[in-house]
Amino acid sequence: MLDNSQLPLRVGIVGTPGYVQADSTIPTEQIIETIGENTGNLAFQYAVASHIASTKHYVSWDSSDPAWVREVCDILVYPAANAINPRRDHTQRADFIEAVDLPCVVVGLGAQAPELGSEVKLNKGSERWLKVLAERSHSIGVRGEYTADVLARIGIQNTLVLGCPSH
């Protein structure tokens, strides 16, 4: 008989399956917002989701109930984009990850800056979000050394340079 440690993990994927189910009644602006204002996000979300054989549930930072996520998932997978952005406040994302309180796998997290080497000054909410992710992750897969350095400056050392998940 299998015990729970031998059962396949039920995976919550933050984002889309690499496409948006939409019809002509959904405004284009809503679809664009759903995909993070970048159609390239669909490519790496599809790439990550296609490598997961376990039961998948798609989770939204904004609309998923943390209690539901805890009930149906054992782990969260976050196919990340260039979300480390000084103009964004990810307080709500930090609150969500804390409320869900599941282990996390982060793949492809990147930093945005005016130019490579620029210092990225994050607000408290975004810095907290990154630290909450780091606490729940064995390692954070980042897009490059620059992102690893940005995270190291705020005390996050558990990074691994993987590049973009679409590769």
Image (cartoon, helix red, strand yellow):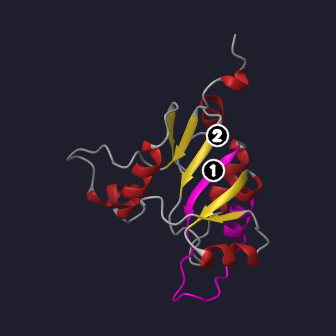
Q: CA distance from mark 2 to mark 1?
A: 8 Å
Q: Where is the C terminus found, in terms of image quarters?
A: bottom left
Asked whether the residues under the numbered discs 2 and 1 touch, taking CB atoms below 8 Å apart as contact, a structural biologist would say yes
Q: How many marks?
A: 2
Residue 4, picture quadrant? top right
Near-viewer residue (154 or 32): 154
Judged from the image, the secondary structure of the residue bearing numbered disc 2 is strand
- Tell me which label, 2 or 1, sits earlier in the chain: 2
From this view, report whether residue 70 is shown above or below residue 97: above
* Residue at the left extreme, as displayed: 24
Looking at the rendered structure, the kind of residue marked 1 is Val
Q: Which residue is mark 1?
A: 105
Near-viewer residue (95 or 127): 127
Near-viewer residue (117 or 92): 117
* Residue at the right extreme, as displayed: 155
Percent of width and height locating residue 80: 53, 59
Who's the residue at 75% across and 78% down the image?
153
Judged from the image, the secondary structure of the residue bearing numbered disc 1 is strand
Q: Which residue is mark 2?
A: 75
Q: Assess whether residue 11 is covered by the magenta stretch.
A: no
Left or right position of 18 against 155: left
From this view, report whether residue 10 is shown above or below residue 27: above
Who's the residue at 69% across and 15% down the image?
2
Percent of width and height locating residue 73: 61, 34
Left or right position of 35 against 58: left
10 Å crowding of disc 2: few (<14), some (14-19), many (20+): many
Tell me where the magenta segment starts and ends, as one range: 103-131
Looking at the rendered structure, the kind of residue marked 2 is Ile
Who's the residue at 64% across and 23% down the image?
7
